[in-house]
Amino acid sequence: MRGLFITLEGGDGAGKSTQIRNIESFFDKKGLVVVHTREPGGTPISEKLRDILLDSGNLEMHAVTEMLIYAASRAQHVRELVKPALEKGHIVVCDRFLDSSIAYQAYGRGLGDMVDIVNSYATDGLTPDITFWMDIDPKEGKERVSKMGDFDRLEMEQMDFHYKVYGGYKALSEKYPGRIKRIDASKSVEEISEDIETHLIELCSRKGL
Ligand code: TMP
């Protein structure tokens, strides 16, 4: 038996955390075990790598170094936590996964195909069953983040970087329309929850859950 692997994606300030809690309660009500995790992070080693990646003092980090550390964090997370949980039949809800590396490193940093090649080793062939792309205009996302406090290293990037990331997500959603569901994150929290729930109900009926 294999569980479900659900990922949430989007620019900074898209409101992923609130929706992750709603997804958790959707599956809780069905009596299924939900594992909530995140990238970069999710295991002790991957969380240490997260600290390096997001440290606003690490401004001299090269784009290739950055991409490799995200991939290293993912390689550990997939093998130590995500795959074992899926093998137990659990529902894994993950805040960001490979699509973030494509959007931020391939498109945002301009690293292109190198990101796919490296990450084919990191993911060990794992693909989400469904991905919610929380679509928010980068300017609005930045305004939301600025209300929450200090910027991390990625959030400190200029707007043109965030627009490139946005272009990456848009391209991914067009390339994988079956897996990636675009969610209009400018709507109210309640409306967004309903949109996501509609997709989850469809997914569960397809998977016999
Ligand atoms: P967050 O967990 O607060 O969303 O922060 C993670 C940051 O790292 C966010 O700005 C997106 C970025 N990121 C990448 O650039 N590449 C990746 O592969 C992942 C997982 C995240």
Image (cartoon, rainbow, N blue to C red):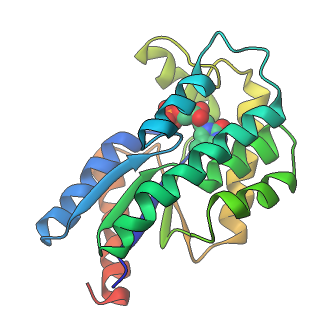
Quadrant of the snapshot with the N terminus: bottom left
Residue 201 position by quadrant: bottom left
What x and y, as percent, mark residue 83?
A: 44, 66
Residue 79 visible to an observer of this rendering: yes
**In the foreground, 20 or 76:** 76
Residue 104 position by quadrant: top right
Q: How many marks?
A: 0
Residue 11 visible to an observer of this rendering: no
Point 57% across, 70% down: residue: 127
Residue 53 position by quadrant: top right
Residue 85 relative to residue 126: left or right: left
Query: Ligand 1 quadrant?
Result: top right
Quadrant of the snapshot with the C terminus: bottom left
Point 72% across, 64% down: residue: 120
**In the foreground, 37 or 180:** 37
Point 65% across, 25% down: residue: 154
Point 35% across, 65% down: residue: 85
Residue 102 relative to residue 199: left or right: right
User: As displayed, is residue 180 above or below residue 74?
Assistant: below
What x and y, as percent, mark residue 112?
A: 87, 51
**In the foreground, 187 or 11:** 11
Residue 19 relative to residue 70: left or right: left
What x and y, as percent, mark residue 58?
A: 69, 15
What x and y, as percent, mark residue 43?
A: 42, 43
